[in-house]
Amino acid sequence: MDYLDKDILSIQQTRDLLKRAKQAQKVLAGFTQEKIDSIAEAMAEAGYKNAARLADMAVNETGIGVVADKVVKNEFASKNVWEYIKNMRTAGVISEDREKGIIEIAEPMGVIAGIIPTTNPTSTIIFKAIIAVKARCSIVMSPHPRAIKCSREAARIMEEAAVSAGAPEGVVSCIENCTREATQELMQSPMTAVILATGGSALVKAAYSSGKPAFGVGPGNVPAFIERSADIDRAVCDIIASKTFDNGTICASEQAVVTEKVISDKVIEAFKANGCYFLSPEEIFHVEKAVILRGGGVNPEVVGKSAAEVAKIAGIAVPDNTRILIARMFGVGRSYPLSAEKLCPVLAFYIEEDWQSSCDRCIELLNYGGLGHSLAIHSNDRNIIMEFAMKKPVFRILVNTPSSQGAIGFTTNLQPSLTLGCGSWGGNVTADNVGPQHLINKKRLAYSNTISSCYHYTIEEIEKAVARYLSAV
């Protein structure tokens, strides 16, 4: 089969899947809240039950990440997400304000296009399938070419669980012949109502350029600031736990550590004591070449690899038990490649005079590819924490918690989600942790209020009311 044949086949398959999804969604739209909840719950249970097998498939197929951590991601995408959204109203009347005379009625958006990344190929499918069906939408997934088998199996499990619980066939599906043309067809088809896009910047921009409503995820260049009042040992352990989780493949993982000069020696000592390796200037040069492509962006070969594997690719020798490679940096931008997002256990490290200069450095880092996403601060000084909260151009500020797990709502009370909006600062339509509430339209039934309803009053009464209003003004 030549490329043209594959191209045509993939487009036709996408159209067929969309037709089935369209029919399935029409049926879903008529389901009650109770019926929808029973289906979504069955999907969550199936995702949780198959978490380990799907994690193993994902790592074996992609070579990215850690099996044990992907198990946690799959369980989070099913159990934690479901526990948060299970009581959310998404069908029929979802709210009623009798005093104001406003009733809100949920209407599903329709067929969802789910764009799936290679970094989280099964957990993202579980998550997007559950929130789509909870909103009475069907969904067609476009997997990454390097993760077709595991993504397809995750979608099959979701579809099977949904159908067994009473959903129509076609409610969850996955493109098998994955090509760029198929993804474009999926995003631009008249049958597609909205796009849930998780992936690189180019793909997210393509989603927003498709002419469809889209929820995209901007890149994360997350700084973590360790302030002098922080519990240093805890802060370092939190950063390590976050950055090494699935080898740094969550976009909310820390990309740089910023600390104050007065505590810098203690911070460095704590990182070294926990298996982190500080690179020499010559080693930094080799790691830069290995991790960041010449034209910018992360080298796919290092994504989701361990610190030891990244070091090997870079041609440097580090202890076998090294958990993170740390590079002392003195600036931000193209002249400092490791100041950008790195989807592997490599951290930039900055030492600043005080919290004010640290604040400026964090803003500089965020402006270099992380606007709107997340920032972590480790501090016990509420005033400084609030200064960071008020001034940082991000929508998730994680306090004394691992950034990866905190941003997705695992170690915080944020809404559990694997799609983290970056708002207008990051070129996204929302700054929220995305959930079913974003996949419904709200129809509003608004009763006339007694003040503005002219037919309740005589002309004389209205004229008197207007005169009173004018005299008051």
Image (cartoon, rainbow, N blue to C red):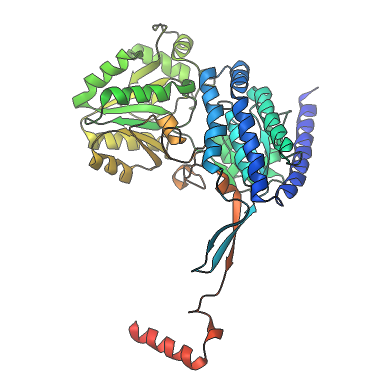
- The quarter of the displayed image where residue 425 is located: top left
Residue toward you, 396 or 106: 106
In the displayed structure, 326 sits above or below 387; it is: above
Q: Is residue 395 above or below residue 104?
A: above
Residue found at x 42% / y 19%: 288
In the picture, measured across the screen, residue 318 lies left or right of residue 451, that is left
Q: Where residue 293 sits in the image (x, y, percent)?
A: 49, 22
Q: Quadrant of residue 229?
A: top left
Position of residue 70 relative to residue 93, above or below, is above
Is the N terminus in the top left, top right, bottom left or bottom right quadrant? top right
Confirm whether residue 200 shows in the render.
no
> Residue 184's x, y, as percent?
68, 38
Depth order, front residue of 323/29: 29
Quadrant for the C terminus in the image: bottom left
Q: Is residue 82 above or below residue 104?
A: above
**Residue 88 at x, y = what percent?**
55, 48
Q: Residue lying furthest bottom in this view?
A: 460
Q: Please report the residue visible at 57 percent of the width from the left and 63 percent of the height from the top.
A: 103
Quadrant assignment, res 447: bottom right
